[in-house]
Image (cartoon, rainbow, N blue to C red):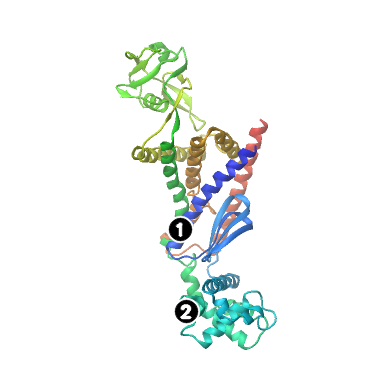
Amino acid sequence: MIISIVAAVVIFAILIVVHEAGHFVMAKRVGVRVLRFSIGYPPRLFGIRRGETDYAFGATPLGGYVRMLGDEIAEEPSAETITSYLGELKLDLLAAAKTRGGLVHAGTNAVANPPGPGNKAGDATLIAMAREIEARPHDFDTTMLGRKLKPDEAILLGEIARCAALEQAGSVERATARLAEIKPVGLVKEFNARAFPSQPLHRRFAIVLAGPASNILFAPLLMTIVLMFGVPTLLPVLGALDHGMPGYAAGLREGDHVTAIDGVAIDSWDAMSRAVKDSSGRPLDLAVQRGQDAAGAIHVTVRPELLPEETIYGDHEPTWIIGVKPSGAATVKKLSLLKAIPAGVAESARMAETLVIGIGKIVAGKTPVRQALGGPIMIAQIAGREAHQGFAEVALFMVTLSLELGIINLLPVPLLDGGHLLFFAIEGIRGEPLKLRHREIAMQVGLFLLAILMAFVILNDISRLIG
């Protein structure tokens, strides 16, 4: 059980990092400020700040998020949002001062004894900076920060200097509160330049799409590695045969090794199965190796029969079959890099197609929902089972989950990435975003639906355990 839980957490953590990294990289690329990159949901356990971003781990596993500046549903920044933004600017200034040695330039006496009552830790350095920029505006950058002072930082320091000059208690806090209240045009302009909601439509679309796209693109990359490492592959060796089916009637027997169909070499059970299912009922010439005789192959002509067969989706469809099952004989198949890349892309595309068809069947009601859907308990069970099998099995499971995560997130459901993309598409068609009230209602409905779905899959997992 412990192995299952650990395996599930590790697998989810990797896939979440891939997903959120897509949002993160694209946001940074188009100039949006990323406030936090979190693995797990709040409360925050620990983390480290690098540059403008807090890289954190949350106490609630199996999730994660990228928080961007202004990443909210409101149409304009609120006072609370501006206050949070100014807090980030303070951290930027303090980090730059520490790296540059600006704390020393500010004077040890000023840092050790913040001027005026009510000032918090770090306020002394900010006040010293504010006074420095008033005294020496032309060489301030190189003296304390080692970089050019940004326009929004200059506005903040200017207000801090004003409050400090009045010797007000808690000068920095008062300056922040006043700026959040009056929202200077210059400050809001700088905020909008780095905030997510105020970006052009194509940039917002790219940022949101990058998450699911990263998961989808990660699948063939990982599949390529798996194919190079080696994948356990069922051989086309016959096991049990149905005596009333075409295979047995044509002369196939248990233990026969199918080496070719209609002159095309067959090296796996999947390849043989696909050839039979794609036959459209025409007679197939099977080259068969029987027993230990390697001198030559026996040729058996089999005409597949069209019968209802249970599919991987849980429903029944007419399928061309010959009535044979695999013996279980397997080998480890390894490919070179040049062969693994196209094979990895092709296999990932086939898996993605299977997932999309499966989702369509669930929506259409052709696949039993209880059979098709699984939650965290089932995923942990599968992860634990695959972990015992080895790297290839775990990696293949990750490929499937990564594709599922990417494809499901593209569904047009509010709160999912696909829901945001739908809003953006509507905005592009209308020429303006949906009204704030309509977006709020959509988000509430989306949250309700996701809560119901999560409760259903967890109860479904429990019923599987009990049953």
Q: Which mark is residue 140?
A: none
Q: Which one is in front, 13 or 81? A: 13
Q: Secondary structure at mark 2?
A: helix
Identify the residue under disc 2.
Answer: 142
Q: Earlier in the sequence, mark 1 or mark 2?
A: 1
Tell whether 100 sits left or right of 223: right
Tell whether 79 sits left or right of 403: right
Residue at image position (61%, 42%) is 6
Mark 1 vs mark 2: give the one in front: 2
Residue at image position (58%, 86%) is 162
Q: Amino acid at mark 2?
A: Thr
Identify the residue under disc 1.
Answer: 25
Is residue 430 in sight in this rendering? no
Quadrant where the image shows the N terminus: top right
Quadrant where the image shows the C terminus: top right
Q: Residues within 10 Å of mark 2 (few under 14, many from 20)?
A: few
Residue at image position (58%, 84%) is 161
State how far apart marks 1 and 2 are (Cα): 30 Å
Q: Position of residue 229 (x, y in %)?
A: 44, 36
Q: Position of residue 5 (x, y in %)?
A: 62, 41
